[in-house]
Amino acid sequence: MKTQINRLSLLLVLSVLTGFAARSQGVSSTTTQKDTRVPVLKTYLIEREIPGAGLLTPDQLKGISQKSCTVLKEMGPKIQWIQSYVSGDKIYCIYKAENEELIREHAKKGGFPANKIVEIPTIISPATAEN
């Protein structure tokens, strides 16, 4: 039953995220005047198991967010935090990164768990039905 609820939670999060992530999916290699390549960033869903995450105070969540942003700034443009959802004992995060290893490095440097990392190669939304 708990596994089924976790799967349903994950599906719900993915459903909510499709509209937002679809808008941010447009990062690709481009050439500027200096012929500098922008990294191709893939979309990832990270599941972080944090007991009592849903009970964290606004100040605690702010502290976690600040730590994450500090680490991201140090790591550079090859990894970006898009948004996170806090529920129960988990935090579900959407990141853009060149590869999964950068996600793991961010988690290690920030002291955050990254229990599951799933690459999201395709995103659909209600707009998909109209195309």
Image (cartoon, grey):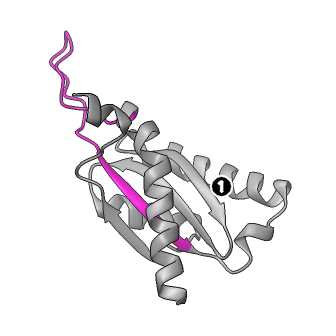
Q: Is residue 42 magenta?
A: yes
Question: Which one is in front, 121 or 61?
Answer: 121
Question: Which one is in front, 125 or 46?
Answer: 125
- Picture coordinates of residue 2 (x, y %)? 54, 88
What residue is at 27 percent from the left and 35 percent from the top? 128
Q: Amino acid at mark 1?
A: Lys
Determine the main secondary structure of the stretch shown in magenta.
Answer: loop
Would you place residue 108 above or below residue 125 in this image? below
What residue is at 33 percent from the left and 65 percent from the top? 118
Q: Which residue is mark 1?
A: 67
- Picture coordinates of residue 40 (x, y %)? 22, 39
Q: Is residue 125 visible?
A: yes
Would you place residue 124 above or below residue 14 in this image? above
Segment tinted magenta in the rendering: 24-48
As helix, strand or loop, the secondary structure at mark 1 comes to: helix
What residue is at 52 percent from the left and 90 percent from the top? 1
Question: Which one is in front, 64 or 42?
Answer: 42
Would you place residue 10 above or below residue 66 in this image? below
- Picture coordinates of residue 115 (x, y %)? 46, 77
Residue with the most extreme bottom position: 1
- Picture coordinates of residue 59 (x, y %)? 84, 55
Residue with the most extreme front position: 130
Badge 1 density bin: few <14, some 14–19, many ≥20, Cα 10 Å: some
Q: Is residue 96 magenta?
A: no
What residue is at 21 percent from the left and 28 percent from the top? 131
Give residue 87's quadrant in the image. Answer: bottom right
